[in-house]
Image (cartoon, helix red, strand yellow):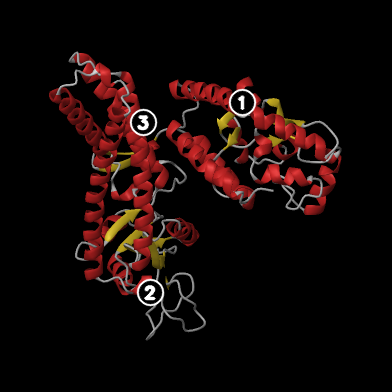
């Protein structure tokens, strides 16, 4: 492969034709270089690394305080305290054991690893897993040693401690995000890839909340491989301290290795992008085989004990919600009947798991006879080949707008959850005419039960386009976990109360 780097003009860079060194500045007019792309120096990078160490120590301190808070709350409210002996030795033993095991599990599951601190869901998932494992281990140790440790104390203390820990991690992430605005991105990134992959990599880097900043790229072309030293020197001239390499076809299979050799004398990091994306970290593991690193990808799991637990949570959650919302349900029913003619409940055939048809329940938000106008409005809107959702739909009643804004119209689907057709968390169910427009990729969303809420609802709802919504649904389907459901449930409350993206 070949590539020829361009040289920066005095005061600004220029982006040239394919095959040249590309820098993210205008090619036709001088512009002020992006400050985050030119101000990263070795001194600033040392400060950033020192800041990382301080941040890790702060997280350890916050974790210890969170654990202590949970245990103290359980003690103050006397959750099973009477079952403890009351002696100072027993208290010290209980607290020391719980803190030690909890911290070890947080360390073992790498909940404070730099790479996941910018990824909220993954960080929270590890905290939840560590807390669960720690609780089970403490209970097992207490049982083996015949220590009279009350279940109420253990469950209450670990539940409160986990909640405080997740909250403190969230606040720490927000503080870190604000701090990143004041400094250049930690990774000033130079991308080495074929033409088609550069935009894809840049899009991912832009989502890292300032952790990665793209400052240039080298396009690998067909032909003889470029000199690795020239590639690295071009990255240095662009102000990069991190090189992201996307594997491509090379005449010399040793070229990627030579690229890493050329970086040995530079203060740079090397990242290699696998061709497989949209895979959650728990499904990935690196397994060296005779010196060759292999990236193992676990296949999606659509059955097993975790799915049984998910169903149990669905049933219990739906029953509790129906009991708690029974009075609001009656009030909403009365309001619908008062503001428009027709029944309060609207029923529509939708497509569920593995293409199974079921009757989906909703509070009616449209005038009677609205379904007869659906195909006409769909044709007029030009929304062929995607889920039909019309902003300012003339069929929606005034009270229906309110119900839709806060997703209250979906509450009757709790009955669908009890029937087993839906789950509390999952991709939203689509009508039959929308599913008829699915391509091969979109059909994979039918591998999971549809849900009342999901990644789509907490990530923008109807403001997302079709491709973005499908990408989120497939990520959920293929990387599902109980901890992911828990985080989606927490984010749902915020999304619904904001009422943004719903119409």
Q: Quadrant of residue 205?
A: bottom left
Determine whether label 1 and label 2 are within 8 Å by CB.
no
Q: Position of residue 467 (x, y in %)?
A: 60, 49
Residue 53 appears anywhere in the view = yes
Q: Position of residue 419 (x, y in %)?
A: 64, 20
The circle on residue 35 is 2
Q: Is the residue 474 above or below the residue 182 in the image?
A: above
Q: CA distance from mark 2 to mark 3?
A: 44 Å
Q: Earlier in the sequence, mark 1 or mark 2?
A: 2
Q: Position of residue 473 (x, y in %)?
A: 56, 40
The circle on residue 159 is 3
User: Which residue is depicted at the point 48% across and 62% down?
Assistant: 195
User: Which residue is depicted at the point 23% across and 42% down?
Assistant: 291
Q: Earlier in the sequence, mark 1 or mark 3?
A: 3
Badge 3 local density, few (<14 within 10 Å), some, or many (20+)? many
Q: Is the residue 171 above or below the residue 329 in the image?
A: below
SS category of the residue bearing label 1: helix
Query: In this rendering, would 147 be left or right of 341?
Result: left
Q: Nearer the viewer, mark 2 or mark 3?
A: 3
Determine whether label 2 and label 3 are within 8 Å by CB.
no
Kindly identify which residue carries mark 1.
322
Instruction: Please state, as top left, top right, bottom left or bottom right, where the N terminus lies in the image.
Output: bottom left
Residue 284 appears anywhere in the view = no
User: Which residue is depicted at the point 76% across and 40% down?
Assistant: 365
SS category of the residue bearing label 3: helix
Q: Is the residue 485 above or below the residue 239 in the image?
A: above
């Amino acid at each position: 492969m070949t590539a020829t780097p361009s040289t920066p003009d005095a005061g600004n860079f220029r982006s040239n034709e394919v095959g040249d060194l590309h820098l993210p500045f205008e090619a036709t007019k001088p512009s002020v270089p992006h400050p985050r792309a030119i101000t990263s120096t070795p001194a600033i990078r040392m400060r950033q690394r020192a800041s990382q160490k301080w941040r890790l120590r702060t997280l350890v301190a916050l974790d210890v305080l969170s654990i202590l808070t949970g245990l103290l709350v359980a003690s103050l409210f006397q959750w099973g305290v009477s079952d403890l002996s009351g002696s100072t030795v027993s208290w010290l033993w209980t607290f020391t054991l719980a803190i030690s095991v909890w911290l070890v599990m947080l360390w073992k599951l790498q909940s404070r690893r730099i790479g996941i601190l910018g990824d909220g869901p993954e960080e929270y998932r590890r905290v939840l897993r560590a807390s669960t494992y720690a609780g089970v281990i403490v209970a097992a140790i207490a049982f083996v040693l015949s220590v009279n440790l009350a279940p109420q104390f253990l469950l209450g203390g670990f539940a409160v401690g986990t909640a405080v820990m997740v909250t403190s991690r969230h606040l720490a992430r927000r503080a870190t995000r604000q701090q990143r605005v004041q400094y250049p991105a930690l990774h000033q990134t130079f991308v080495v890839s074929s033409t088609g992959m550069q935009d894809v990599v840049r899009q991912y880097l832009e989502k890292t909340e300032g952790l990665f900043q793209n400052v240039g790229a080298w396009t690998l072309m067909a032909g003889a491989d470029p000199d690795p030293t020239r590639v690295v020197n071009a990255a240095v001239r662009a102000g990069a301290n991190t090189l992201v390499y996307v594997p491509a076809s090379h005449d010399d299979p040793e070229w990627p290795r030579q690229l890493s050799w050329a970086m040995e004398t530079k203060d740079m990091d090397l990242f290699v992008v696998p061709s497989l994306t949209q895979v959650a970290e728990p499904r990935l593991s690196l397994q060296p085989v005779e010196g060759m690193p292999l990236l193992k990808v676990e296949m999606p799991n659509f059955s097993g004990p975790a799915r049984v637990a998910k169903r149990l949570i669905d049933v219990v959650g739906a029953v509790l919600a129906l009991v708690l919302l029974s009075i609001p349900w009656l009030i909403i029913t009365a309001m619908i009947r008062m503001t428009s003619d027709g029944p309060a409940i609207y029923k529509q055939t939708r497509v569920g798991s593995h293409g199974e048809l079921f009757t989906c329940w909703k509070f009616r938000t449209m005038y009677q006879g609205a379904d007869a106008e659906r195909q006409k409005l769909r044709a007029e809107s030009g929304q062929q080949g995607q889920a039909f959702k019309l902003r300012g739909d003339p069929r929606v009643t005034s009270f229906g707008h309110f119900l839709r804004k806060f997703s209250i119209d979906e509450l009757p689907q709790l009955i669908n959850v009890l029937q087993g057709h839906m789950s509390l968390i999952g991709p939203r169910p689509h009508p039959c005419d929308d599913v008829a427009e699915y391509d091969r990729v979109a059909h994979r969303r039918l591998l999971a039960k549809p849900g009342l809420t999901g990644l789509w609802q907490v990530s923008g709802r109807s403001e997302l386009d079709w491709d973005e919504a499908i990408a989120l649904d497939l990520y959920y389907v293929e990387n599902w976990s109980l901890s992911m459901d828990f985080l989606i449930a927490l984010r749902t409350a915020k999304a619904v109360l904001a009422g943004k993206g719903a119409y």
